[in-house]
Image (cartoon, rainbow, N blue to C red):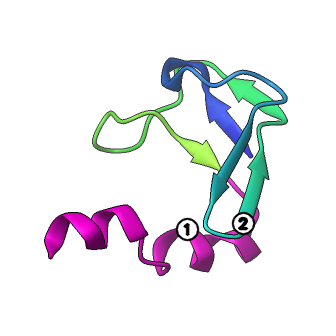
Amino acid sequence: MVADDAIGFHIGQHLRRDNFDNTVVGLTKNIAGFTADPVIYVMLTCVPNIIYRLDRNLLRNEI
């Protein structure tokens, strides 16, 4: 993934969500979405795992 430096990630950082690993391979500067939130770029094949997989911690907090 490539992330805006405002998020605080660093190159080489590994992020794990369930069984999916992502590695920060690059940083951008001052790139924001239409809501002014910093942006993360990932491969299109990773998007369903990020958006549609429910986070177990969120489920635990809802019950």
- Mark drawn on residue 50: 1
The one of 46 and 56 positioned closer to us in this rendering = 56
Contact (Cβ within 8 Å) of mark 2 with mark 1: yes
| Circle nearer the viewer, 2 or 1 | 2
Residue 17 image-quadrant placement = bottom right
**Please, what is the three-letter code of the amino acid marked with disc 1?**
Ile
- Residue beneath label 2, please? 20
Q: Give the farthest residue toward the left.
A: 63
**11 shown above or below 45:** above
Residue 26 image-quadrant placement = top right
Residues in magenta, as a range: 42-63
**Please, what is the three-letter code of the amino acid marked with disc 2?**
Phe
Q: Is residue 10 magenta?
A: no
Residue 38 image-quadrant placement = top left
Rendered residue at 74%/46% (across/down): 1
Rendered residue at 61%/18% (across/down): 29
Q: Position of residue 53 (x, y in %)?
A: 49, 79
Rendered residue at 15%/76% (across/down): 63
Q: Position of residue 55 (x, y in %)?
A: 42, 68
Circle count:
2
Q: Position of residue 5 (x, y in %)?
A: 59, 19
Dot 1 falls on a residue whose secondary structure is: helix
Dot 2 falls on a residue whose secondary structure is: strand
- What whole-number distance in Å separates the C-alpha atoms at marks 2 and 1? 9 Å
Rendered residue at 36%/36% (across/down): 37
Mark 1 or mark 2, which is nearer the start of the sequence?
2
53 with respect to 28 (left or right): left
Q: Is residue 53 magenta?
A: yes
